[in-house]
């Protein structure tokens, strides 16, 4: 059976009577889990035949096998990590703009790499967002608003979603 990513919209549009049934191979995004929790919607995984198991419990996020190099505490969840990438024209203070916005949003940079090739730069960083005020959507919008055409483009995504996409 094909794998499907369950998104926030799936939870909002497809839940019936406080329950969303998903397939055995479906992957749940952090945003889907967040909205399901806020709306008291149980996410129930169907078995291989497509039938829900009677009395089945809500889907649990799989445990992380071992702490990554970036997980300095050993117990942090990937839902609290985001990957921020920026690519564009290099100019003075690009890195400062991005890191200052992260500081304003209470994000903690765990790892960062920047490369400059002629007049262009690329940046990728991983940040811990468990202390941000507000939700992920607001955080993402605040960072992506730094993007301007002809300057640089920023992309923000949860690390768990990024890792799931790389497994497909």
Image: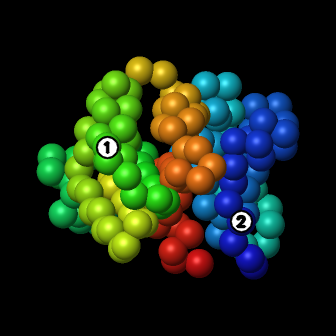
Q: Residue at x 38, y 32 (%)?
A: 101
Which scheme is used to colour this image of the protein? rainbow
**Where is 130 relative to 81, above or below?**
above
Q: Which of 6 and 51 is in front in this view?
A: 6
Can the viewer see residue 60? Answer: no
* 19 displayed left or right of 155: right
Q: How far apart are marks 2 and 1 (CA)?
A: 40 Å
* 70 displayed left or right of 29: left
Can the viewer see residue 17? Answer: yes
Sooner in the amino-acid sequence: mark 2 or mark 1: 2
Q: Which residue is drawn at 74% across and 76% down?
A: 2
The disc at residue 4 is 2
**Can you give x and y, in whole percent of width and height, for residue 98 in the image?**
37, 41
Q: Where does the C terminus fall, quadrant-wise?
A: bottom right
**Where is 64 relative to 135, above or below?**
below
The disc at residue 107 is none
* 139 displayed left or right of 69: right
Determine which residue is flagged by label 1: 93
Q: Is mark 1 on a helix, strand or loop?
A: loop
Q: Is mark 2 on a helix, strand or loop?
A: loop
**Can you give x and y, in whole percent of width and height, for residue 23 in the image?**
73, 63
């Amino acid at each position: 059976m094909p794998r499907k990513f369950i998104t926030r919209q799936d939870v909002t549009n497809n839940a019936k009577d406080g329950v969303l049934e998903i397939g055995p191979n479906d992957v749940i995004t952090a945003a889907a889990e967040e909205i399901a929790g806020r709306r008291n919607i149980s996410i129930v995984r169907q078995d291989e035949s497509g039938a829900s198991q009677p009395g089945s419990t809500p889907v649990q996020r799989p445990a992380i096998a071992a702490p990554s190099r970036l997980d300095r505490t050993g117990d942090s969840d990937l839902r609290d990590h985001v990957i921020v990438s920026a690519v564009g024209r290099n100019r003075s203070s690009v890195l400062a703009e991005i890191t200052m916005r992260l500081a304003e949003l209470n994000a903690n940079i765990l790892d960062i790499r920047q490369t400059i090739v002629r007049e262009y730069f690329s940046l990728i960083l991983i940040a811990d967002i468990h202390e941000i005020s507000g939700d992920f959507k607001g955080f993402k919008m605040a960072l992506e608003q730094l993007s301007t055409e002809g300057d640089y483009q920023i992309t923000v995504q949860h690390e768990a979603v990024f890792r799931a996409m790389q497994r497909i």
